[in-house]
Image (cartoon, coloured by chain):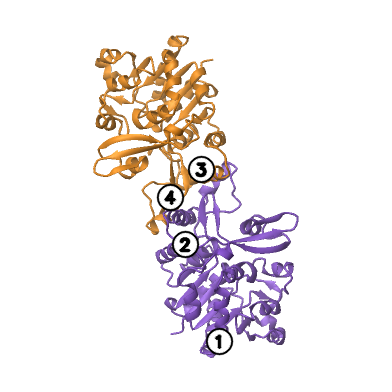
Chain colours: A purple, B orange
């Protein structure tokens, strides 16, 4: 009964999880999700990464976009645009029901973890999905010539096509891990750092006090999957962000970030030549196809990770 | 250039206004709208009566329902119901865009009157629509065996099918008329009290300090239209509410309520026999078809009102 805890951002993590639950019982999987790209928009609390994981595992994700619900309509946005409202962050009609529900429950005093669990249950996703924290945590991005802006203003409104000078996680110092998070890190047979953005998806999870330490304590059976392949992110701005912030945008740069937290880094075959450089950072290197072009590929990658887990579990 | 200011609730007022703008230039019409049935739902600020007026004058009202937008879809509600969320107050997908916009603008510090004007402008409704107040005003209903509940909980959730012991307008003592409201009452050639619920639609407008006095000062050229025909409300709970609260559910009861505020009451032909009883309350009585079965009928009623206005304007 290999229990797996996965640190997850959005699309990349969701695809990996979709593969994982094809080859491993979902009830043995706990997901710790990033909430630092949450935003309050038009009064609604939106949790993009949590929803991407839920919708993907529900088989309801908009495959083309990678976010939002399939078979979506956009009537609310059409009305909003009539008024000249802020429509840069697109909320589909089906999707809006999730934000209405979450906002109503928060207003009634429920915490985000409870609500997230109830949403996940309604979609019958099988895995346990925990927000990293119930507290306010917000990725703030300092952009050249502009100053500090919110994550979604950077990511969606500016299409992450700007130079970044700094990233910080507002609220992290006051945030506590959500109930169950530290236990899920301590008790799982294996911890997986999903192929998510190390800076703005995994970074904020690690910034919540206690998480980095909990992960470090069980490093030997923790496995990271590189989101960087051949020097580029499969999706999103991870490569540029790494470079802008002084990291090497390569599997070696990723190895340097994760070596204190994971004993193994899974890299793509395209980076075969960098195995020695990765291991020189003090992390074991496993080479496998990591590009999840479909759910078969994602399942194959999950099998590789579970294989490493079998080999390393019990190492402490 | 007869300028007309109309005190308006929801459906009944909107239908009258639809007729009025067919026979009178919209730019000469100011509407003072009820905001006491506003509610915050799932974090969104919903203004049902203002929206009913706007959507109706935009030719976009859902004719069958009397509220909401035509050609509506309900995807957000379907998602919300999946979670077991509060779906008793139905928010259509198109309609949601209005609530998103209003909530966002309020969050940015705009006042309700400004936002209402911008929404009205986007729909090009022609008339000037003013909320009675920018301040919080909420109709609270004391229901037998239950205690006090919000207006929409009474009206929508319980389908106004309960005995009412009391109605009050929370916030009224601290509310101020929105900018332009008192001038619109003082300066218009004629003031019309639309055929709306006297208790819960016109009542809260009159409860805002200064409005009842402003109306009383120009009583001679103010005209009310009875929402009660042959002892029953055309729509909604006006008759039952009048009875429950100790008023007579008839044009005579309406005359008693409005006599201090309007010199003329327009009643339906069905109540022809009650003309003397109405006038015994100290209000002139005009008999006309008041049932607005279509917009031709509404226009005919508006013509009657404008005719009375011509006869009474300048009476002071």
Nearer the camera: disc 4 or disc 3:
3
The answer for how far apart the CA atoms under marks 4 and 3 are is 15 Å
Q: Are marks 3 and 1 on the same chain?
A: no
- The chain under label 2 reads A
Residue farthest to the right, as pictured:
A145
Q: Chain of mark 1?
A: A
Q: CA distance from mark 4 to mark 1?
A: 47 Å
Mark 4 and 2 residues: CB-CB less than 8 Å, in contact? no
Q: Do callouts 4 and 3 point to residues on the same chain?
A: yes
- Mark 4 vs mark 1, foreground winner is 1
Q: CA gap, disc 1 to disc 2?
A: 33 Å
Q: Which residue is mark 2?
A: A112
* Residue at disc 1, secondary structure: helix
Point out which mark residue A308 bears.
1
Give the numbered dot on residue A232. Answer: none
The answer, for residue A64, to whether it is visible in the render is no
Q: Is residue A11 left or right of residue A146?
A: left
Tag 4, which chain?
B
**Is residue A59 shown above or below B5?**
below
Q: Alpha-carbon distance for marks 4 and 2?
A: 25 Å
User: Where does the image place residue B291, in percent across and percent down from the top left?
Assistant: 34, 25
Badge 1: how crowded within 10 Å, few (<14), some, or many (20+)?
some
**Residue lying at 44% horizontally and 50% vertically, measured from the top left:** B42
Tell me the chain of label 3: B
């Amino acid at each position: 009964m290999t229990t797996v805890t996965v640190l997850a951002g959005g699309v990349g993590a969701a695809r990996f999880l979709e593969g994982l639950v094809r080859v491993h019982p979902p009830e043995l999987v706990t997901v710790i999700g990033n909430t630092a790209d949450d935003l309050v928009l038009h009064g609604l609390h939106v949790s993009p990464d949590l929803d991407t994981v839920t919708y993907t595992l529900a088989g309801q994700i908009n495959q083309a976009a990678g976010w939002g619900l399939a078979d979506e309509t956009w009537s609310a946005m059409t009305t909003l645009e009539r008024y000249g409202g802020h429509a840069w962050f697109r909320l589909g009609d089906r999707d809006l029901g999730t934000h209405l529900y979450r906002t109503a429950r928060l207003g009634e005093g429920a915490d985000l973890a409870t609500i997230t669990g109830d949403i996940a249950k309604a979609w019958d996703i099988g895995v346990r999905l925990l927000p990293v924290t119930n507290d306010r945590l917000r990725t703030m991005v300092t952009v050249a010539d502009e100053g500090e802006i919110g994550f979604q203003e950077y990511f969606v409104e500016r299409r992450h096509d700007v130079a970044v000078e700094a990233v910080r996680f507002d609220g992290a110092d006051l945030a506590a891990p959500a109930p169950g998070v530290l236990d899920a890190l301590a008790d799982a047979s294996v911890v997986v750092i999903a192929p998510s953005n190390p800076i703005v998806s995994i970074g904020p999870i690690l910034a919540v006090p206690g998480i980095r330490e909990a992960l470090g304590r069980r490093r030997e059976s923790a496995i990271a999957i590189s989101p960087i392949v051949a020097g580029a992110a499969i999706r999103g701005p991870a490569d540029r962000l790494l470079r802008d912030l002084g990291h090497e945008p390569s599997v070696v740069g990723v190895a340097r970030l994760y070596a204190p937290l994971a004993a193994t880094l899974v890299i793509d075959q395209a980076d075969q030549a960098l195995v020695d450089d990765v291991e020189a950072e003090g992390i074991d290197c496993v080479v496998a196809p990591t590009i999840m072009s479909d759910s078969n590929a994602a399942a194959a990658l999950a099998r590789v990770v579970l294989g490493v887990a079998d080999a390393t579990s019990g190492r402490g």
